[in-house]
Amino acid sequence: MTSQSRTERFVRKLARGTSRRSILSRIGLGLVSAPVFPLLPVERAHAAKDRSVQAKTSFARHAQTTDDTKCDYWRYCAIDGSLCTCCGGGIHTCPPGTEASPTSWVGTCINPDDGKAYLIAYRDCCGTADCGQCYCDNTDRGNQVYRPQENNDIIWCFGASSMEYHCSTAVMVGAAE
């Protein structure tokens, strides 16, 4: 008996024992269950390893927690612009005569005191000319413009009464888990 005739007998036997609906249902089950595989514990363990690697960026190694008027302050890992702490405002408040933009970009910064990652919302203060003091351009783990919510190269005065940029704040949203 040749291998071709054995193959033909096997295929004919398989065809007699299964229906088209059965084959289609198995294919459909495979397609529906495929997106579940990235949720397995192996994927989560891989993501945890990535987080520990992220903490070793150049900015995270040199960040400090005492002087919020310096570009290496830990919350400023993704800030771009003049620091409001040098322009009459605070780390999370705009100076008098300006207003906070309702839109912001975000970054994930590592606090060197506790080694934990925190989500930071950077909000531009708008309404008067650029402060021009304490200019910082940190792009720690920055993303390209195709992810605008995480891009610091955009003037984020959208929705404010004026598009004139003054300075930037860094509001801690919470722990990044």
Image (cartoon, rainbow, N blue to C red):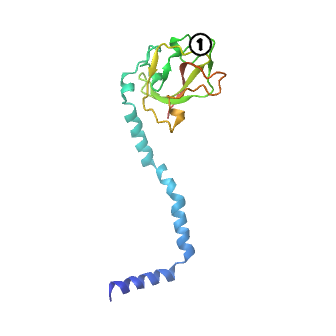
Residue at the (60%, 28%) spot, across then down? 103
Circle 1 packing at 10 Å, graded few (<14), some (14-19), many (20+), is: some
Quadrant of the rendered structure where residue 129 is? Answer: top right
Above or below: residue 147 compared with residue 169: below
Front one among 34 and 93: 93
Residue 110: image location, x then y, percent = 44, 27
In the displayed image of the protein, which residue is found farthest to the left? 2
**Callout 1 secondary element:** loop
Front one among 63 and 123: 123
Front one among 113 and 92: 92
In the displayed image of the protein, which residue is found farthest to the bottom? 1
How many labels were placed on the picture? 1
Residue 158: image location, x then y, percent = 62, 28
Residue 72: image location, x then y, percent = 41, 19
Residue at the (51%, 33%) spot, across then down? 150
User: What's the residue type where badge 1 is placed?
Assistant: Pro
Residue 38: image location, x then y, percent = 47, 50
In the displayed image of the protein, which residue is found farthest to the right? 161
Above or below: residue 103 compared with residue 93: below
Quadrant location of the N terminus? bottom left
Quadrant of the rendered structure where residue 138 is? Answer: top left
Residue 20 left/right relative to 135:
right
**Residue ID for mark 1:** 95
Front one among 124 and 52: 124
